[in-house]
């Protein structure tokens, strides 16, 4: 029986582990942290639970291969309830509020009422959101293993998505916003997505919610990760936590196993790198083994940027329906990282009663951070006292702005925790503190990197960084692709 060592117990590593164990292989996962899940995690503060990851989970609608994969690995199914999002988000400007509802016809009416002069673009946007609901994440087999028939089948299943790409595929978020005359519509579109993202990403994201394919598993991110880890163990998999890997041991064109940072050697027939690819090719393996596609994306910081977030969690005394969902509003200028922001968001987790003590609620803010912001935080991080002081000052200023927007929170809201791009770097070895992979800008070509390492016969890659924009579905897909390759070779 072949033994497979998997480096990283995030969603990609857990997915590969479940499928390989199910197929009869012997696997061991080595995770550097105390809990599995990688960035799909959460933690407790003062009786509250802070969810780090899931705003929506693509693949919650039955009938797709991705949904079947989530069920197979234990993320969904088996009595797992799903919270249906009523709204995508709302944005407020100059006293007016616009909400992108799950019911897109309700959104259409609200948009038309707000800005009759934008009727043509409004109708086009909503109509194309309907087309984007056909978008699926291919998870059957690796792209480099697909036949012409496979590609034809995939294209036919998403033929409506081709129309979306033709209309919106060659513009970015800002250009999409400028198609509209009303300032609130413009602001709402640019509020939600980090700059640099292509316009179609907004439509696809919204379409996952309107199509019922982007809901939230009850229990949130950590519960989902623990369910998958439980499925892995049920199949006989061995999960090592607090087990940081120092390097992969090579002998010619093969890996013999891994060396842990505590000096323990683990032999293996296959080694799967299910972690940050920058870490893989600068710590675990020599950079010379990095695939060409990854080299191209890491090498062009303009065309393939990454983004992160400066985030704050608040505990609230009371439950207020006025702040349900995700809401974006203007605020007094505030310096976060290297940039001055004039708007901020709050997201409520009131749909999860267990996330807060009875009679209370938890809110979170996420300020989008660029690579320039990352450089700011990296320099500051060298002085831990100054770093902590700056985080606390921003958090306090943010609380003041939340209270200015929602005066009824006066005396009822406090900061629970604050985390920055450096948190993701420390916890997950994330490249420049990013929590998703490369943003494919309109100037760049889309690159999908095969999960093979040229020159090494038995080292494979399973990471969200192999295909933009990353995220949980991509991580699961890459985990399955690795399992597919190994299973094809046999026991």
Image (cartoon, helix red, strand yellow):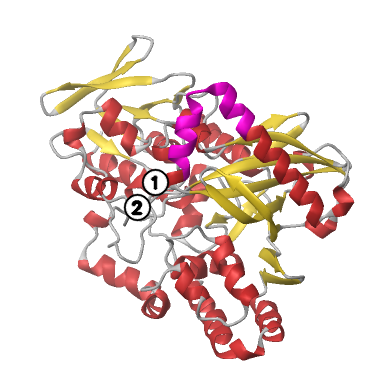
Horizontal and vertical percent position of residue 389: 63, 29
To which residue does mark 2 refer?
Answer: 467
**Which image quarter: residue 115?**
bottom right
| Badge 1: residue crowd in 10 Å (few <14, some 14–19, many ≥20) | many
Left/right placement of residue 317 relative to residue 214 reads right
Q: Is residue 389 magenta?
A: yes
Mark sitting on residue 432: none
On screen, residue 307 versus residue 94, left or right, reads left
- Is the residue 288 above or below the residue 211 in the image? above
Q: Position of residue 258 (x, y in %)?
A: 29, 20
* Residue named by callout 1: 464
What residue is rendered at 53% in x and 80% in y?
125
The residue drawn where x is 62% and y is 76% is: 183
Numbered disc 1: secondary structure: helix
Which quadrant is home to the C terminus?
top left
Q: How many numbered tags mark residues here?
A: 2
- Name of the residue lying farthest toward the top: 263
The magenta span reads 373-390
């Amino acid at each position: 029986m072949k033994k497979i060592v998997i480096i990283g117990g995030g969603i990609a590593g857990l997915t590969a582990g479940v499928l390989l164990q199910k197929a009869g292989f012997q696997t061991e996962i080595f995770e550097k942290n105390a809990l599995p899940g990688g960035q799909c995690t959460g933690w407790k503060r003062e009786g509250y639970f802070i969810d780090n990851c899931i705003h929506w989970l693509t693949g919650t609608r039955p009938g797709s291969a991705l949904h079947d994969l989530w069920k197979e690995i234990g993320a969904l199914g088996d009595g797992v309830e799903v919270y249906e999002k009523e709204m995508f988000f709302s944005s407020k400007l100059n006293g007016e509020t616009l909400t992108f509802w799950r019911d897109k016809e309700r959104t259409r009416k609200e948009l038309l009422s707000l800005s009759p002069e934008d009727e043509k673009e409004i109708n086009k946007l909503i109509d194309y959101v309907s087309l984007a609901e056909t978008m699926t994440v291919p998870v059957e087999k690796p792209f480099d293993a697909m036949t012409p028939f496979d590609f034809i089948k995939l294209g036919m299943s998403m033929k409506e998505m081709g129309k979306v790409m033709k209309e919106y595929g060659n513009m970015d978020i800002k250009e999409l916003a400028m198609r509209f005359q009303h300032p609130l519509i413009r602001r709402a579109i640019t509020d939600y997505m980090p700059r640099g993202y292509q316009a179609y990403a907004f439509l696809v994201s919204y379409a996952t919610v309107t199509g019922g394919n982007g809901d939230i598993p009850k229990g949130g991110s950590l519960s989902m990760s623990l369910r998958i880890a439980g499925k892995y163990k049920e199949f006989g998999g061995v999960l090592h936590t607090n087990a940081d890997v120092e390097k992969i041991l090579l002998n010619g064109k093969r890996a013999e196993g891994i060396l842990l940072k505590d000096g323990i050697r683990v032999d293996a027939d296959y080694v799967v790198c299910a972690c940050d690819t920058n870490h893989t090719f600068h710590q675990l393996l020599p950079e010379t083994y990095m695939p060409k596609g990854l080299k191209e994306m890491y090498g062009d910081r303009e065309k393939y940027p990454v983004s992160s977030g400066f985030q704050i969690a608040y505990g609230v005394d009371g439950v207020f329906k006025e702040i349900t969902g995700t809401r974006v509003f203007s605020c007094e200028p505030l310096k976060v990282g290297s940039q001055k922001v004039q708007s901020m968001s709050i997201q409520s987790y009131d749909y999860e009663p267990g996330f807060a003590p009875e009679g209370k609620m938890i809110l979170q803010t996420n300020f989008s951070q660029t690579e320039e912001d990352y450089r700011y935080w990296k320099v500051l991080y060298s002085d831990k006292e100054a770093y902590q002081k700056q985080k606390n000052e921003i958090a306090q200023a943010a609380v003041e702005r939340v209270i200015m927007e929602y005066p009824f929170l006066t005396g009822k809201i406090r900061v629970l925790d604050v985390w920055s791009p450096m948190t993701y770097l420390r916890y997950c070895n994330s490249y420049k503190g990013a929590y998703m992979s490369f943003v494919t800008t309109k100037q760049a070509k889309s690159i999908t990197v095969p999960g093979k390492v040229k020159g090494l016969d038995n080292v494979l890659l399973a990471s969200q960084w192999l295909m933009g924009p990353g995220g949980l579905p991509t991580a699961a897909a890459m985990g399955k692709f690795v399992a597919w390759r190994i299973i094809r070779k046999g026991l």
